[in-house]
Image (cartoon, grey):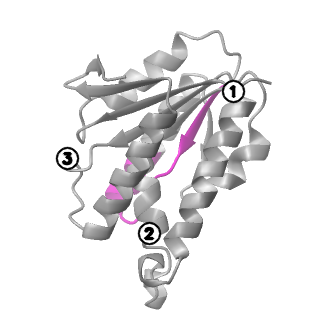
Amino acid sequence: MAAGQLIFVSGGVRSGKSAWAEKFIYKTDAENKIYLASGQAYDAEMEERIQRHRQDRKDQGWKTIEQPLHLEKVIPEISAGDAVLWDCVTTWLANELYEGWEQGAPCADRKDCMEQKWMYLQETIRKIRHQTELLVIVSNEVLDDFVRDAAYQQWLGQIHLWLVAQSDKAYEVENGVAYRRK
């Protein structure tokens, strides 16, 4: 099977990029619309938000796969012809970069840990793209994200550059309006 289309969507926090990406997927003829969610609940507010999103997606016919870490684990759940929305890179990156902080050993501090995760992510995106007709990836802009951490921003910038290079189209969303950048 030839590689499916890859669309990269970025923008500021609460810019409307996820809603825009969802509408983009809905315009396709894909029978299955898969939502890869990276969020984790660390407090009551986030738990409520995740529950609300779960219900909204269910009502809209999405198959949601919650995968905050190790995105490669979703590959067996994706079929040819699916349209996949991954929301979002920034949440996934924070989860992976700081995995292990509870034990005092976050990935960011372990030699080659993020390099290996980065390699897995690239391979995972290639595999998903070859299994689907459409993969839409959502992310926050490097300087618009709330996290002010040099390692995080360096990795996010590197990931974005690669994603845009791999993408068929790239959009930046501001106030719910998408501007094509590639």
Residue identifier under label 2 = 97
Mark 3 / mark 1, whichever is N-terminal: 1
Instruction: Please state the horizontal and vertical placement of residue 84, each as a whole percent of the image.
Output: 60, 30
Instruction: Please state the horizontal and vertical placement of residue 1, each as a whole percent of the image.
Output: 80, 24
* In the depicted structure, whether residue 35 falls above or below residue 22: below
The part of the image, by quadrant, that contains residue 175 is top left
Instruction: Please state the horizontal and vertical placement of residue 138, each as a whole percent of the image.
Output: 42, 37
Mark 2 / mark 1, whichever is N-terminal: 1
Image quarter of the C terminus: top left
Is 47 within the magenta?
yes
Q: Amino acid at mark 1?
A: Ala
Residue identifier under label 3 = 144
Q: Kindly state the secondary structure of the residue where label 3 is placed.
A: loop
Q: Amino acid at mark 2?
A: Leu
Image point 31% across, 23% down: which residue?
Answer: 181
Look at the image and give the residue range highlighted in magenta: 33-50
Image point 44% across, 69% down: which residue?
Answer: 97
Q: Which mark is residue 3?
A: 1
